[in-house]
Amino acid sequence: MSSPPFTQRFPALESRDFRFLLFGQLISLTGSHMQQVAVAWQLYEFTHSASALGLLGAFRVAPIVLFALLGGVVADALDRRRLMLFSQSALAGVSLVLAIATRQGWASAGLLYAMASVSGAALTIDTPTRQALVPLLVPRERLAGALSLWATTVQIATIAGPSIGGLVLEHAGVAPVYFVDAGSFLAVIGALLAMKTRTPARPGATVGLAAAREGLAFLRRTPIIRSTMLLDFFATFFGGSMLLMPIYADQILGVGKQGLGLLYAAQPVGAALAGAVMAAVALPKRQGVVILWSVAFYGVAIAVFGASEWFWLSLLALAASGAADTVSMVIRQTVRQLVTPDELRGRMTSVNMMFFMGGPQLGEVEAGYVARLTTPLFSVISGGFACVAVAGLAALLSPALRRFEPEARPTTSPR
């Protein structure tokens, strides 16, 4: 018997516009992850400083903290397709500036920090807009499959990008990585221009403080969402040591640029494997407990990576941390889908963005300064154990999270 067509296995791909955007995003995200490896390595070559590497996270997260909620308000009110065209063009421009500056010898640590801030500002529009756009491209009954395909695509790009970036760094240098990333955005821009779906501004929607307050008021009334966001923030804050990876590749493991790419790819490999398993089996009943154990396991894996002096063990530990983080992430997203109204999705995404991007970026600052005051090993190991402590505190202080089960559908608390 012949196998069914690819679109019968994955019905969401029958949507032409979703299919275009999905494959365009795969190419673009792969380029973006190549760029992240190049930026970290170039900054390390400029400074040879753990704190300077950590400071990169502060420049990335500052515009996210300042403007993310505004980005969510805009995503809920304006034409999402046009907003993505703007944000993707801005991100492409960042890579083009870095490529030209590096090729001409103008690049510096200051320029890398500045471009990190510009990228962060563009993401405050791009992330909530993209997550609010996808549900408009597929029928409602196929949305879960579309989101699963999207998550898988992200993980594939996260695996491929650092690995390819490490190879290009090794054989061609930094500037070609930036040129490739700038060109990769053409795939998404082309997909958006080719879309037949139109996403006009929502009638009656406004962009202003009242709309932002509406989103924050919903968050205050919904303790289960608030608990998961806070847990995510503190766990990734203490586990945020990815920008110390060049030090591990160079000084501790001695694997160089190509090994650096593999270290960056290890976490998403574990994440992709865990995601595939979760797509094939039913989610557990006591989902709140699973979230807490996943965060604790994530911390243990990070501590093992920090202590390892063997490349293979480092890769396994990073893969395990990626798997644990994916289990926690999938269940957290399920919780938010259960309780967030459609008209607030952009704003909830933007608030969550401050937590899930702010935590690791600020954590990289913390990890860099702790590494400077002590050692990189102590910084990573202590951060891993702090993640375990955070999971324990959350279990004690958040009954709504600890007791969450899908049958006991959470409700908003009274004003």
Image (cartoon, rainbow, N blue to C red):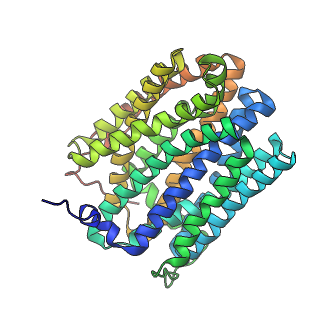
| Foreground residue among 358 and 305 | 305
| Residue 190 seen anywhere in this rendered image of the structure | yes
What residue appears at the point 23 percent right and 40 percent down from the top-left corner? 286
Q: Residue 46 occupies which quadrant of the picture? A: top right
In this rendering, is residue 301 above or below 339? above
In this rendering, is residue 407 above or below 381? below
Question: Looking at the rendering, in which quadrant would you find the C terminus?
Answer: bottom left
- Residue that extends furthest to the left in the rendered view of this protein: 1
Q: Residue 323 occupies which quadrant of the picture? A: top left
Q: Residue 287 occupies which quadrant of the picture? A: top left
What x and y, as percent, mark residue 410? 29, 54
What x and y, as percent, mark residue 156? 44, 48
State left or right for residue 114 relative to residue 180.
Answer: right
| Foreground residue among 204 and 87 | 87
What residue appears at the point 64 percent right and 31 percent down from the top-left corner? 257
What residue appears at the point 46 percent right and 35 percent down from the top-left corner? 267
| Residue 412 seen anywhere in this rendered image of the structure | no
Question: Looking at the rendering, in which quadrant would you find the N terminus?
Answer: bottom left
What residue appears at the point 64 percent right and 26 percent down from the top-left corner? 256
